[in-house]
Image (cartoon, rainbow, N blue to C red):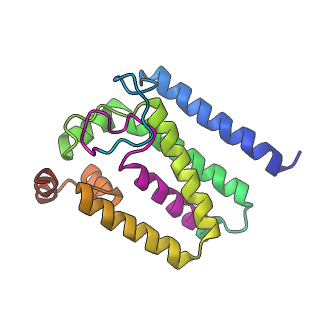
Amino acid sequence: MSANKILPALCVAIVVATALTLYLMGRIPICACGTVELWYPSASGPGTSQHIADWYSFSHLIHGFIFYGLTWLLLRRQPIAARLLIALFIECGWEIVENTSFVIERYRENTVSLDYDGDSILNSVSDILFMVLGFLLARKMPVLLTVAIAVGLELWVGYVIRDNLTLNVLMLLWPIEAVREWQGAG
């Protein structure tokens, strides 16, 4: 059986295993509010990271751009299916780590996400799918367009919600009080 026939089933299995792991960690399947929304517009409301898409979905799209670029640089001789699987494992691993008590507390202590309580399983699976979409888009788009979209999304989301992938990573790893104050002033 070829990799092209096995890949979809393997991808689904990895995502299902991730969702099961999150469930066993105590994550809730959907928002505690009991609804499922396609887009949750507030960056700091109780439904953030609970629905299908929110402002942080753009970060996961950019993850896909980054993973495609890195696997192209480091593993370009490998089939695209293998590179996508590597990206999927990394993203699924991050979704599990992101929802551990340690990382949730780190977000609460070092970012403006004081009420962050982790992602719903629906949101985590959606984040994974946004990464896959970003990976596949980066595969088809010219490099400069991919970079321009990533920079544009970072600037736009940063302007609108005073947070984005860059600031999220910065504040998680090397918190800067001045950045936290600026984010909280919005």
Asked if residue 173 is positioned above or below residue 17 in the image, the reply reads: below
Residue 171: where, in percent of width, then height? 24, 53
Q: Is residue 127 left or right of residue 33?
A: right
Q: Is residue 95 left or right of residue 71?
A: left
Asked if residue 84 is positioned above or below residue 142 in the image, the reply reads: above
Tell me which segment is drawn in magenta.
42-71
Closer to us: 126 or 98:
126
Q: Residue at x 32, y 34 (%)?
A: 47
> Which residue sits furthest bottom?
144
Image quarter in which the N terminus is found:
top right
Residue 87: where, in percent of width, then height? 58, 52
Closer to us: 85 or 42:
42
Residue 75: where, in percent of width, then height? 65, 65
Q: Is residue 171 left or right of residue 146?
A: left
Q: Quadrant of residue 159?
A: bottom left
> Which residue sits furthest right?
1
Is 154 colored magenta in this rendering? no
Q: Residue at x 54, y 58 (%)?
A: 134
Is 62 colored magenta in this rendering? yes
Image quarter in which the C terminus is found:
bottom left
Q: Residue at x 79, y 43 (%)?
A: 6
Closer to us: 113 or 173:
113
Q: Residue at x 12, y 55 (%)?
A: 177
Task: Report how many numbered discs are placed on residues in the image.
Answer: 0
Q: Is residue 26 left or right of residue 42?
A: right
Asked if residue 24 is positioned above or below residue 86 in the image, the reply reads: above
